[in-house]
Image (cartoon, rainbow, N blue to C red):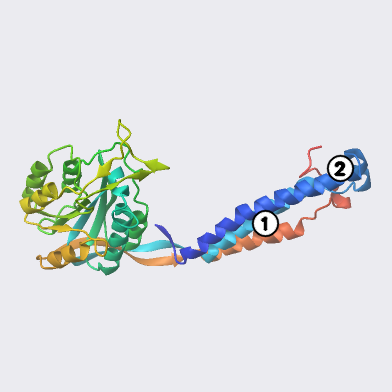
Protein backbone atom coordinates (compact mmCIF):
# COMPACT_ATOMS: atom_id res chain seq x y z
CA UNK A 1 0.00 0.00 0.00
CA UNK A 2 1.30 3.44 -0.92
CA UNK A 3 0.67 6.54 1.15
CA UNK A 4 2.20 10.00 1.53
CA UNK A 5 3.68 11.17 4.83
CA UNK A 6 3.18 14.87 4.01
CA UNK A 7 0.45 14.93 1.33
CA UNK A 8 -0.06 18.70 1.64
CA UNK A 9 2.97 19.20 -0.63
CA UNK A 10 1.02 17.61 -3.49
CA UNK A 11 -0.76 20.95 -3.90
CA UNK A 12 2.48 22.14 -5.49
CA UNK A 13 1.54 20.05 -8.53
CA UNK A 14 -0.65 22.98 -9.57
CA UNK A 15 2.63 24.77 -10.42
CA UNK A 16 3.27 22.43 -13.36
CA UNK A 17 0.46 23.66 -15.64
CA UNK A 18 1.41 27.23 -14.72
CA UNK A 19 4.99 26.56 -15.83
CA UNK A 20 3.78 24.90 -19.04
CA UNK A 21 1.51 27.82 -19.95
CA UNK A 22 4.30 30.29 -19.19
CA UNK A 23 6.72 28.37 -21.41
CA UNK A 24 4.23 28.20 -24.30
CA UNK A 25 3.68 31.95 -23.98
CA UNK A 26 7.46 32.48 -24.03
CA UNK A 27 7.87 30.38 -27.21
CA UNK A 28 5.03 32.23 -28.90
CA UNK A 29 6.56 35.65 -28.23
CA UNK A 30 10.06 34.53 -29.22
CA UNK A 31 8.93 33.01 -32.52
CA UNK A 32 6.91 36.13 -33.22
CA UNK A 33 10.01 38.30 -32.76
CA UNK A 34 12.12 35.98 -34.95
CA UNK A 35 9.57 36.21 -37.77
CA UNK A 36 9.79 40.00 -37.57
CA UNK A 37 13.57 39.74 -37.84
CA UNK A 38 13.55 37.63 -41.02
CA UNK A 39 12.45 34.45 -42.78
CA UNK A 40 13.14 30.99 -41.31
CA UNK A 41 15.94 30.40 -43.83
CA UNK A 42 17.63 33.67 -42.86
CA UNK A 43 17.38 32.92 -39.13
CA UNK A 44 18.81 29.39 -39.58
CA UNK A 45 21.76 30.80 -41.50
CA UNK A 46 22.47 33.34 -38.73
CA UNK A 47 22.20 30.79 -35.88
CA UNK A 48 22.95 27.41 -37.53
CA UNK A 49 23.67 25.63 -34.24
CA UNK A 50 20.38 26.64 -32.59
CA UNK A 51 18.07 23.64 -31.95
CA UNK A 52 14.43 24.33 -31.00
CA UNK A 53 13.85 20.65 -30.27
CA UNK A 54 16.69 20.61 -27.75
CA UNK A 55 15.06 23.52 -25.98
CA UNK A 56 11.73 21.67 -25.77
CA UNK A 57 13.43 18.53 -24.47
CA UNK A 58 15.19 20.59 -21.81
CA UNK A 59 11.89 22.03 -20.62
CA UNK A 60 10.29 18.54 -20.51
CA UNK A 61 13.18 17.36 -18.33
CA UNK A 62 12.67 20.37 -16.04
CA UNK A 63 8.96 19.55 -15.66
CA UNK A 64 9.68 15.89 -14.90
CA UNK A 65 12.41 16.89 -12.45
CA UNK A 66 10.12 19.31 -10.61
CA UNK A 67 7.37 16.67 -10.59
CA UNK A 68 9.73 14.15 -8.98
CA UNK A 69 10.92 16.64 -6.36
CA UNK A 70 7.31 17.51 -5.43
CA UNK A 71 6.52 13.83 -4.96
CA UNK A 72 9.63 13.43 -2.83
CA UNK A 73 8.51 16.33 -0.61
CA UNK A 74 5.18 14.51 -0.12
CA UNK A 75 7.23 11.56 1.23
CA UNK A 76 5.89 8.46 -0.56
CA UNK A 77 5.85 5.47 1.78
CA UNK A 78 5.25 1.76 1.21
CA UNK A 79 3.86 -0.59 3.82
CA UNK A 80 6.56 -2.99 4.94
CA UNK A 81 4.70 -5.11 7.47
CA UNK A 82 1.15 -6.22 8.20
CA UNK A 83 0.23 -7.45 11.67
CA UNK A 84 -2.91 -9.16 12.91
CA UNK A 85 -4.20 -7.63 16.12
CA UNK A 86 -7.11 -8.35 18.40
CA UNK A 87 -9.22 -5.31 19.22
CA UNK A 88 -12.15 -4.86 21.53
CA UNK A 89 -14.64 -2.79 19.61
CA UNK A 90 -17.53 -2.68 17.19
CA UNK A 91 -18.00 -2.76 13.47
CA UNK A 92 -19.88 0.36 12.42
CA UNK A 93 -21.36 0.75 8.95
CA UNK A 94 -22.64 4.22 8.05
CA UNK A 95 -25.25 4.38 5.26
CA UNK A 96 -25.52 7.90 3.80
CA UNK A 97 -28.41 9.09 1.67
CA UNK A 98 -26.92 10.81 -1.41
CA UNK A 99 -30.15 11.51 -3.28
CA UNK A 100 -30.71 15.02 -4.63
CA UNK A 101 -32.90 15.88 -1.63
CA UNK A 102 -29.71 15.94 0.44
CA UNK A 103 -28.78 19.15 -1.42
CA UNK A 104 -31.58 21.03 0.36
CA UNK A 105 -30.32 24.02 2.30
CA UNK A 106 -32.52 23.83 5.40
CA UNK A 107 -29.22 22.72 6.96
CA UNK A 108 -26.16 24.88 6.30
CA UNK A 109 -24.53 24.70 3.86
CA UNK A 110 -26.54 21.62 2.75
CA UNK A 111 -27.80 18.44 4.38
CA UNK A 112 -25.05 16.40 2.71
CA UNK A 113 -22.21 18.78 3.58
CA UNK A 114 -23.25 18.80 7.24
CA UNK A 115 -23.34 15.00 7.15
CA UNK A 116 -19.81 14.80 5.75
CA UNK A 117 -18.53 17.22 8.40
CA UNK A 118 -20.15 15.25 11.23
CA UNK A 119 -18.78 11.89 10.03
CA UNK A 120 -15.31 13.42 9.74
CA UNK A 121 -15.55 14.62 13.35
CA UNK A 122 -16.70 11.14 14.39
CA UNK A 123 -13.66 9.54 12.77
CA UNK A 124 -11.42 11.76 14.90
CA UNK A 125 -12.90 10.12 18.01
CA UNK A 126 -12.82 6.46 16.98
CA UNK A 127 -9.95 4.28 18.22
CA UNK A 128 -10.69 0.56 18.39
CA UNK A 129 -13.84 0.34 16.27
CA UNK A 130 -13.88 -0.50 12.56
CA UNK A 131 -15.93 1.50 10.08
CA UNK A 132 -17.38 1.26 6.58
CA UNK A 133 -19.50 3.53 4.38
CA UNK A 134 -22.48 2.78 2.13
CA UNK A 135 -24.07 5.35 -0.20
CA UNK A 136 -27.64 5.02 -1.41
CA UNK A 137 -30.29 6.78 -3.44
CA UNK A 138 -32.33 4.69 -5.90
CA UNK A 139 -29.63 2.00 -5.50
CA UNK A 140 -27.08 1.24 -2.80
CA UNK A 141 -23.31 0.75 -3.11
CA UNK A 142 -20.43 0.10 -0.72
CA UNK A 143 -18.28 3.22 -0.87
CA UNK A 144 -15.77 1.96 1.73
CA UNK A 145 -15.55 -1.64 2.99
CA UNK A 146 -15.15 -2.23 6.72
CA UNK A 147 -11.70 -0.95 7.73
CA UNK A 148 -9.67 0.31 10.66
CA UNK A 149 -7.78 2.76 8.44
CA UNK A 150 -9.36 6.03 9.57
CA UNK A 151 -7.21 8.12 7.22
CA UNK A 152 -8.62 6.27 4.23
CA UNK A 153 -12.12 6.55 5.67
CA UNK A 154 -11.82 10.33 6.03
CA UNK A 155 -10.63 10.61 2.43
CA UNK A 156 -13.61 8.59 1.17
CA UNK A 157 -16.11 10.59 3.24
CA UNK A 158 -14.86 13.86 1.76
CA UNK A 159 -15.75 12.53 -1.71
CA UNK A 160 -19.41 11.84 -0.91
CA UNK A 161 -21.59 13.38 -3.61
CA UNK A 162 -25.10 13.14 -5.04
CA UNK A 163 -23.52 12.08 -8.36
CA UNK A 164 -22.36 8.75 -6.90
CA UNK A 165 -25.69 7.05 -7.54
CA UNK A 166 -27.31 7.83 -10.87
CA UNK A 167 -30.79 6.53 -10.09
CA UNK A 168 -32.77 8.86 -7.84
CA UNK A 169 -34.93 7.72 -4.92
CA UNK A 170 -34.31 6.54 -1.37
CA UNK A 171 -33.79 2.78 -1.37
CA UNK A 172 -33.26 2.48 2.37
CA UNK A 173 -34.13 -1.21 2.36
CA UNK A 174 -31.46 -1.90 -0.27
CA UNK A 175 -28.90 -0.07 1.89
CA UNK A 176 -29.82 -2.21 4.92
CA UNK A 177 -29.64 -5.44 2.90
CA UNK A 178 -26.24 -4.43 1.54
CA UNK A 179 -24.96 -3.61 5.03
CA UNK A 180 -26.08 -7.02 6.29
CA UNK A 181 -23.73 -8.67 3.80
CA UNK A 182 -20.89 -6.17 4.28
CA UNK A 183 -19.89 -6.88 7.88
CA UNK A 184 -16.90 -9.16 8.37
CA UNK A 185 -17.31 -12.73 9.55
CA UNK A 186 -16.80 -13.21 13.27
CA UNK A 187 -18.24 -9.82 14.19
CA UNK A 188 -21.66 -11.12 15.24
CA UNK A 189 -22.98 -9.28 18.26
CA UNK A 190 -20.83 -6.22 17.61
CA UNK A 191 -22.45 -4.87 14.45
CA UNK A 192 -23.96 -1.41 14.19
CA UNK A 193 -25.58 0.30 11.21
CA UNK A 194 -26.12 4.08 11.26
CA UNK A 195 -28.48 5.41 8.58
CA UNK A 196 -28.41 9.15 7.77
CA UNK A 197 -31.31 10.23 5.57
CA UNK A 198 -34.26 12.56 5.22
CA UNK A 199 -36.39 9.41 5.00
CA UNK A 200 -38.34 10.69 2.03
CA UNK A 201 -39.53 8.72 -1.01
CA UNK A 202 -38.55 5.25 0.21
CA UNK A 203 -39.08 2.80 -2.66
CA UNK A 204 -38.73 -0.60 -0.98
CA UNK A 205 -39.55 -2.20 2.37
CA UNK A 206 -36.97 -1.04 4.92
CA UNK A 207 -38.95 -2.58 7.81
CA UNK A 208 -38.60 -6.05 6.30
CA UNK A 209 -34.91 -5.41 5.78
CA UNK A 210 -34.58 -4.22 9.38
CA UNK A 211 -36.13 -7.46 10.68
CA UNK A 212 -33.60 -9.41 8.62
CA UNK A 213 -30.82 -7.27 10.12
CA UNK A 214 -31.93 -8.20 13.64
CA UNK A 215 -31.51 -11.88 12.80
CA UNK A 216 -27.90 -11.12 11.79
CA UNK A 217 -27.17 -9.40 15.10
CA UNK A 218 -27.23 -5.86 13.70
CA UNK A 219 -28.51 -2.87 15.64
CA UNK A 220 -29.67 0.06 13.50
CA UNK A 221 -29.55 3.69 14.56
CA UNK A 222 -31.14 6.32 12.33
CA UNK A 223 -30.58 10.04 11.97
CA UNK A 224 -33.20 12.23 10.33
CA UNK A 225 -31.66 15.19 8.57
CA UNK A 226 -33.96 17.93 7.35
CA UNK A 227 -36.90 19.89 8.69
CA UNK A 228 -40.62 19.01 8.66
CA UNK A 229 -41.24 22.31 6.84
CA UNK A 230 -38.77 21.27 4.17
CA UNK A 231 -36.75 23.26 1.65
CA UNK A 232 -36.33 23.46 -2.14
CA UNK A 233 -33.47 21.62 -3.83
CA UNK A 234 -30.92 23.72 -5.67
CA UNK A 235 -29.25 21.71 -8.44
CA UNK A 236 -27.06 23.20 -11.17
CA UNK A 237 -28.20 26.75 -11.79
CA UNK A 238 -31.82 26.47 -10.64
CA UNK A 239 -34.15 24.79 -8.19
CA UNK A 240 -35.61 21.40 -9.07
CA UNK A 241 -39.18 21.82 -10.33
CA UNK A 242 -42.07 19.46 -11.01
CA UNK A 243 -43.90 19.02 -14.32
CA UNK A 244 -46.01 22.11 -13.55
CA UNK A 245 -43.00 24.33 -13.00
CA UNK A 246 -43.41 24.49 -9.22
CA UNK A 247 -40.35 24.16 -6.98
CA UNK A 248 -40.01 20.73 -5.38
CA UNK A 249 -39.84 20.96 -1.58
CA UNK A 250 -38.24 18.05 0.28
CA UNK A 251 -39.42 17.41 3.84
CA UNK A 252 -38.16 15.21 6.64
CA UNK A 253 -40.12 11.95 6.99
CA UNK A 254 -39.39 10.72 10.51
CA UNK A 255 -41.92 7.89 10.71
CA UNK A 256 -40.01 5.36 8.60
CA UNK A 257 -36.68 6.22 10.26
CA UNK A 258 -38.16 5.70 13.72
CA UNK A 259 -39.71 2.34 12.77
CA UNK A 260 -36.46 1.03 11.28
CA UNK A 261 -34.49 1.94 14.40
CA UNK A 262 -37.04 0.62 16.91
CA UNK A 263 -37.39 -2.67 15.00
CA UNK A 264 -33.75 -3.50 15.75
CA UNK A 265 -33.60 -2.11 19.29
CA UNK A 266 -31.75 1.01 18.18
CA UNK A 267 -32.82 4.62 18.46
CA UNK A 268 -33.73 7.57 16.27
CA UNK A 269 -32.23 11.08 16.49
CA UNK A 270 -33.37 14.18 14.66
CA UNK A 271 -30.42 16.25 13.45
CA UNK A 272 -30.12 19.98 14.06
CA UNK A 273 -27.93 22.65 12.50
CA UNK A 274 -25.68 22.54 15.57
CA UNK A 275 -25.49 18.74 15.91
CA UNK A 276 -26.13 15.94 13.45
CA UNK A 277 -26.80 13.52 16.29
CA UNK A 278 -23.82 11.21 15.82
CA UNK A 279 -22.44 12.06 19.27
CA UNK A 280 -25.69 10.96 20.94
CA UNK A 281 -25.68 7.72 18.97
CA UNK A 282 -22.04 7.02 19.80
CA UNK A 283 -22.92 7.41 23.50
CA UNK A 284 -25.55 4.68 23.04
CA UNK A 285 -23.11 2.53 21.07
CA UNK A 286 -20.44 2.79 23.78
CA UNK A 287 -22.90 1.21 26.22
CA UNK A 288 -23.10 -1.90 24.03
CA UNK A 289 -21.06 -4.95 24.90
CA UNK A 290 -17.98 -4.92 22.70
CA UNK A 291 -16.35 -8.06 21.42
CA UNK A 292 -12.85 -8.96 20.35
CA UNK A 293 -12.35 -8.33 16.64
CA UNK A 294 -9.37 -9.50 14.61
CA UNK A 295 -7.95 -6.92 12.26
CA UNK A 296 -4.93 -6.51 10.00
CA UNK A 297 -3.10 -3.25 10.63
CA UNK A 298 -0.22 -1.57 8.81
CA UNK A 299 2.63 -1.63 11.29
CA UNK A 300 5.60 -0.08 9.51
CA UNK A 301 6.07 2.11 6.48
CA UNK A 302 9.33 2.45 4.56
CA UNK A 303 10.27 5.88 3.21
CA UNK A 304 10.77 5.99 -0.56
CA UNK A 305 11.21 9.75 -1.05
CA UNK A 306 14.99 9.47 -1.44
CA UNK A 307 14.67 7.45 -4.66
CA UNK A 308 12.17 9.87 -6.16
CA UNK A 309 14.34 12.82 -5.11
CA UNK A 310 17.45 11.25 -6.65
CA UNK A 311 15.57 10.65 -9.91
CA UNK A 312 14.42 14.28 -9.99
CA UNK A 313 17.92 15.61 -9.37
CA UNK A 314 19.27 13.32 -12.11
CA UNK A 315 16.74 14.71 -14.59
CA UNK A 316 17.68 18.29 -13.72
CA UNK A 317 21.38 17.44 -14.07
CA UNK A 318 20.78 15.97 -17.53
CA UNK A 319 18.85 19.10 -18.48
CA UNK A 320 21.76 21.25 -17.30
CA UNK A 321 24.27 19.27 -19.41
CA UNK A 322 22.18 19.54 -22.59
CA UNK A 323 23.01 22.76 -24.44
CA UNK A 324 20.40 24.88 -26.22
CA UNK A 325 22.57 24.75 -29.31
CA UNK A 326 24.27 21.92 -31.16
CA UNK A 327 27.83 21.03 -30.27
CA UNK A 328 30.13 21.54 -33.24
CA UNK A 329 31.91 18.26 -32.52
CA UNK A 330 28.64 16.30 -32.58
CA UNK A 331 26.64 18.39 -35.04
CA UNK A 332 26.41 15.43 -37.41
CA UNK A 333 24.58 13.30 -34.83
CA UNK A 334 20.81 13.83 -35.19
CA UNK A 335 19.45 12.89 -31.75
CA UNK A 336 16.98 15.73 -31.39
CA UNK A 337 16.67 16.87 -35.00
CA UNK A 338 15.40 14.60 -37.76
CA UNK A 339 15.86 17.16 -40.47
Q: Residue at x 32, y 45 (%)?
A: 233
Name of the residue lying farthest toward the top: 243
Q: Residues within 10 Å of mark 1 (few under 14, many from 20)?
A: many
Residue that mark 1 sits on? 62
Question: Residue 316: x and y, percent?
Answer: 68, 60
Task: Name the foreground residue: 136 vs 248.
Answer: 248
Question: Residue 220: x and y, percent?
Answer: 13, 54
Question: Residue 81: x and y, percent?
Answer: 35, 64
Residue 257 visible, this angle: yes
Query: Residue 321 vs residue 128: left or right?
Result: right
Q: What is the CA distance from the residue labelled 1 to the residue labelled 2?
A: 27 Å
Q: Residues within 10 Å of mark 2 (few under 14, many from 20)?
A: few
Q: Which badge, 1 or 2, is on the more N-terminal residue?
A: 2
Residue that mark 2 sits on? 35
SS for dot 2? helix
Q: Residue at x 93, y 41 (%)?
A: 42
Q: Quadrant of the C terminus?
A: top right
Counting labels gives 2
Give the answer, above or below, for where 98 lies relative to 191.
above
SS for dot 1? helix
Query: Residue 147 vs residue 26: left or right?
Result: left
Amino acid sequence: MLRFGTPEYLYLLFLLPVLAVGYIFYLYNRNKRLKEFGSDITVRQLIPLFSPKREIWKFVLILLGVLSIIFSLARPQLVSKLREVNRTGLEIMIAVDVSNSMLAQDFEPTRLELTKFAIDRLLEQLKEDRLGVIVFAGDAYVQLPITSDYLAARAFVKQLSTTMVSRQGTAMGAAIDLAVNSFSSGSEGSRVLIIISDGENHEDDPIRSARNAVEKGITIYTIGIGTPEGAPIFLGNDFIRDENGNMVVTKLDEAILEQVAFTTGGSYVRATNSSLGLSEIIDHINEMEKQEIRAMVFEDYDERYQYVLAFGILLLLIEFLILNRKNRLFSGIKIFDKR
